[in-house]
Image (cartoon, rainbow, N blue to C red):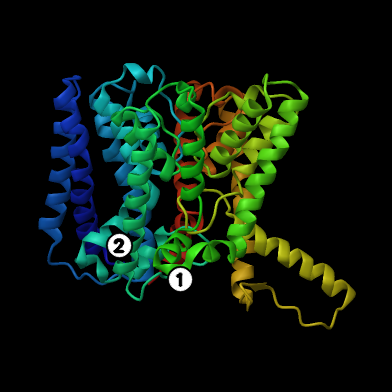
Amino acid sequence: MHWRAIGYLAGLLLMVFSTAMLPPLAIAWYYGDGALTAFVDSYLLTLGTGFVLWVTLRGAPRDLNHRDGFLLVTLFWVVLALFGALPLLLSGATPGFTSAFFESMSGLTTTGSTVLSGIEELPHAIRFWRQEMQWLGGMGIIILALAILPILQVGGMQLYKAEVPGPVKDQKLTPRVNETAKALWLIYIGLTLVAVLALWAAGMGPFDAVSHAFSSVATGGFSPYDDSVGHFSSPLIHYLIVLFMFLGGANFALHFAFLHGGGLRGYLGDPEFRAYLALHVVAALLVTGFLTAYQTYPTLEESFRSALFQTVSIGTTTGFATADYAAWPSLLPFFILMIGFFMGSAGSTTGGIKVMRFLLLWKQGLRQAYLLIHPHAIAPIKMRERAVPEGVIQAVWGFFAVYVTTFILLTLVMMALEGGKFETAVGAVGATLTCVGPGLGEVGPASSFASISTPGQWVLSLAMLMGRLELFTFFVILMPAFWRK
């Protein structure tokens, strides 16, 4: 293990991260909202720590192997959450360190679970910092570093594979990993700018437009208001945010192909995108039907808009809300929580298991049924007219098994910590492991995670980290074989 190289690169990445504190620092100065000292101190501590590591270890070898990449990514997300918590803690926005770390981890992993209430009363700089952390975490701070720090081109593919979500991690948009990182970030920034302008034109103020564009494209879910997007009564704003959540939840490789002349055929020709679109349409229509049948809303348009917004928000693991879906009738609350597990795309900013993996599992199930009838047949699983390697199928099955097992074990732990509250435990673990944000029970969309005990908040912070890193990047460093020479 190249510890000096890991420390050196961690120092560089911390210095990059410290620059993210400058915009909220400027906002604190502009509004005079009392958070200026907190951000000045946080900036200096983050920059200083990174600088000390960089200067002390700058003579270290800079080659990374795949083990170094996994360890650096996992450690850096933890370190990032620690330093991201500083402004929240020093400004007094959170009651203690545990809450500050939970809020920071939730932001950076684009989970959107919060322990805060009375968000409108917080300083503008703190409200903006929460949104900015989600935006940085959406595409990934390490992908940003690969894009702007040439020194990370050495061993960069190890970091890229450890960071990028999805079942196929070796695919790059361009031949060089740093060029791939730049392409991803340019698309991400461009989509964010379009979202800002659209929301501003629809009636949001500049601060709100930027804040909600950050969370929409990053599929994060934080809002500078307690009642989330429900703060705005404009149907146009609701539909626009649905659009940008949906685009953020699609594979960014398709956006890249579209911008390079692929047109809409690139989207419609992709089996995962077709399934992604179909699942969201079906989910919205099903929920609309239930809401209409139970007369939850006075008009069909309101039923459809509420259903569409909540299903897209949870399906893309964003976590915005315009309604308290936990209070909806029949099986709708549980159904909406469950769609957060599988309705995001690989290669997007979403969490969960991803549509691609479920497609492969479905095709594997069909193949097994076919082989029962034709036991001697050769029936490869195909995606995009190409046979999927058996190793990928086995990896998907392994991921699914580990994901389900982790969900069950964490739920049991949370039940033990929270007094056996099954609905709250399932909702909290489901919301954090999938990076959805709001859950059920005491952590529903109309509540916060403030009622969760201190040990419970640490367990859920771990669930967010594992969900963001898609389990294996985290679990691999726990294996004894990882540490053997």
| Vertical side of 249 occupied by 432: above or below | above
Q: Quadrant of the N terminus?
A: bottom left
Residue at 24% of width from left, 55% of height from top? 10
On the picture, is 51 further left or further right than 445?
Answer: left
Q: Which element type, helix, strand or loop, lies under badge 2?
A: helix
Residue at 29% of width from left, 38% of height from top? 84
**Mark nearer the viewer, 2 or 1:** 2
Determine which quarter of the picture holds residue 40.
top left
Is residue 378 visible to the viewer in this orientation of the structure?
yes
Of the pair 441 and 194, the residue shown nearer to us: 194
Determine which quarter of the picture holds residue 201.
top left
Q: Which residue is mark 2?
A: 182
Q: Please provide percent x and percent y for residue 473.
A: 45, 58
On the picture, is 5 further left or further right than 281?
Answer: left
On the picture, is 247 further left or further right than 413?
Answer: left
Is residue 425 visible to the viewer in this orientation of the structure?
no
Q: Which mark is residue 362?
A: none
Identify which amino acid the numbered label 1 is placed on: Gln
Q: Which residue is mark 1?
A: 171
